[in-house]
Image (cartoon, rainbow, N blue to C red):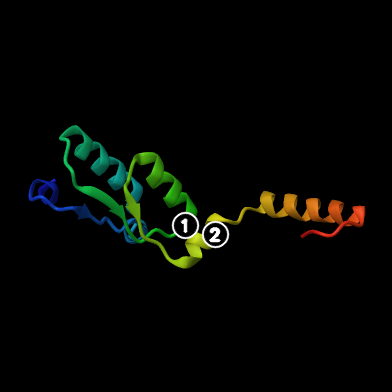
Amino acid sequence: MLAAKAGAAFISPFVGRLDDIGQDGMQLIADTVQIYRNYSFATEVLVASVRHPVHVLQAAKLGAHVATMPAATIRAMFKHPLTDRGLDAFLADWAKTGQTIL
């Protein structure tokens, strides 16, 4: 709240680091977003140290404005075992048709 009252454009809680020490980093995001909405602060919440796609989903659902993450986390957002299996099955079925994929 102090940063918002001082006019900060962003605050940047490091959720992954909080998780590393046994605290719930995403609960801090939930509390902060709620407080900022309650008081109509313009300060945006930048979720830092995002470690996995679940953090991204939770941050978006909570209303965070920005997130920073390593490239591996971004790549992981595109991967899902069911999607991979479905794509493999589709490609196998397509190959049986004798057609080529453009």
Give the quadrant of the N terminus: top left
Res 24 seen here: no
Q: Residue at x 77, y 56 (%)?
A: 88
Residue 88 got which mark?
A: none
* Residue 77 relative to residue 91: left or right: left
Verify CB contact (< 8 Å) between mark 1 and mark 2. yes
- On the image, numbered disc 2 is attached to which residue? 76
Q: Identify the amino acid type marked 2.
A: Ala
Density class for disc 1 (Cα within 10 Å; few <14, some 14-19, many ≥20) is some
- Residue 8 is situated, as x and y percent measured from the top left of the image, at 14, 53
- On the image, numbered disc 1 is attached to which residue? 52
Which residue is at the far bottom?
71
Circle 2: element type: helix
* Residue 53 relative to residue 45: left or right: right
Q: Earlier in the sequence, mark 1 or mark 2?
A: 1
Q: Residue at x 7, y 50 (%)?
A: 6
